[in-house]
Image (cartoon, rainbow, N blue to C red):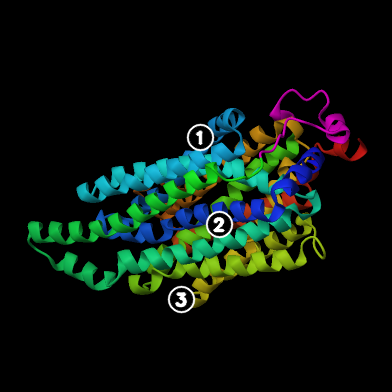
Amino acid sequence: MSNQTVTMEVPAKKVGYGQAMAIISMLFFVFGFVTWLNGALIQFFEIVCELNVSQSLLVTFAFYLAYLFLSIPSSYILEKTGFKNGMSIGLGIIALGSLVFIPAANARSYPMFLTGLFIQGGGLSLLQTAVNPYASIIGPKESAAKRISIMGICNKVAGALAPIILGVILLSGAEELKGKIAAATDPVVKAGLLDNLASRVIGPYTVIAIVLLILAVLLKKSSLPEIDTNEEDAATAAATVGKTSIFQFPHLLLGVLCIFVYVGVEVMAGDVIGSYGKSMGMSLDQTKYFTSFTLVAMLAGYIIGIITIPKYLSAQKSLLICAALGIVFTVLAYTKTGFSAVTCIALLGLANSLMWPAIFPMAIDGLGKFTKTGSALLVMGIVGGAVLPQVYSGMFNKESMFSFLYSPNIDFRHAFLYCMLPCYLYILFYAVAGHKIGKKQLVTA
């Protein structure tokens, strides 16, 4: 990690550290906006494609599954293209996935929608593989978590706006329309209502695609500095001597698992909160905004991080506190009902807020020439966002792909507790001890 700090600060200042930060912040806004549209899409597709909860959660499965398959290839792409060009290509791929929504809406084809989401996830895996280490190493190591917290504000502002904007466009009057669709006895009339609702997605996703393509061109022409993660200073070279494989860094591998469970709980708190509320009898007109509540809580957490890191809190201590909060709010959500339970789930956004900014720099610390590959593995861990919601639904729904977990004695409340609590306990372990394993040589070098 120290080598990137030395090699980056000089070139970054030549073009303007502030300018580089502004560009990266814009990219964090983009993938925050695209990612958190899924909360509204889940409820939208339930109506348009006539799905149950488990089927609608395939939205997150398809989107985050792309990270599993495409993160490692992304590291090879970045080796060839460099960080800046890789970011530009990532934006173009996300735009392509957005355009797939047009024929998908016209055909009202759920598999085609899922294909578009998978392509979007592929573009984001490339973008995140480049952006996250860039943000971590563009300045001093001690303030890496603070920088990513600043980026996180852009990400979560976008995330809070996305479901509200898309919810207003796609789900306006949805409860009334849902009643009309259910009451329609003529198949032609019912199909017409569903087709008309499906067409609402075309306009916003066309606009998204156009904006992304414009940003891709502007980014390619920008003066964003390239960085070289293959050069090592004496300290990092000593720490990585004899290392021939990324799998020789235990703190990184444990960090990948930590990212996996962290993204899983983040997606559960943001995207599942709506279906959780509906399971308690709340109307769609209420639940369509619940994702934004979680994102507002995350935004508050990022602001706290900017104020406190590194002056008052280290990245390690902030992760420990957040993990403890996650445990508390998860247990409270289980014990409460109605809006009190939903509020506790939304407050998990606060608990989750500083986890990524802490885990990512801690996990890539000291990787030197292995940084791109290590970053790719960490981004691959984002697939946790695909897996955990399916595990959750499988516990109480026989029709889930994880139906082997089904038990008649488990309802959605128990399933939420059983999914979330072990994840937060592991994150607590990583904060206390996991990030240190295998790093003795980094300290003594």
Q: Residue at x 81, y 29 (%)?
A: 240
Q: Residue at x 76, y 66 (%)?
A: 308
Towards the viewer: 428 or 335: 428
Q: Which mark is residue 1?
A: none
Quick check: 179 above or below 198? below
Q: Residues within 10 Å of mark 1 (few under 14, many from 20)?
A: many
Q: Position of residue 85 (x, y in %)?
A: 55, 37
Residue at numbered disc 1: 70
Q: Disc 2 marks which amino acid?
A: Glu
Q: Earlier in the sequence, mark 1 or mark 2?
A: 1
Q: Disc 3 marks which amino acid?
A: Gly
Q: Residue at x 54, y 46 (%)?
A: 219
Q: Residue at x 60, y 56 (%)?
A: 25
Residue at numbered disc 2: 266
Q: Which residues are magenta?
A: 226-248
Marks 3,2: beta carbons within 8 A:
no
Quick check: 60 above or below 123? below
Q: Which mark is residue 338?
A: 3
Q: Position of residue 66 (x, y in %)?
A: 47, 39
The image quadrant of residue 279 is: bottom left
Q: Residues within 10 Å of mark 2 (few under 14, many from 20)?
A: many
Q: Is residue 112 left or right of residue 256?
A: left
Towards the viewer: 26 or 288: 26
Q: Residues within 10 Å of mark 3 (few under 14, many from 20)?
A: some
State the separation of the CA atoms marked 1 and 2. Answer: 21 Å
**Residue 164 shown in magenta:** no
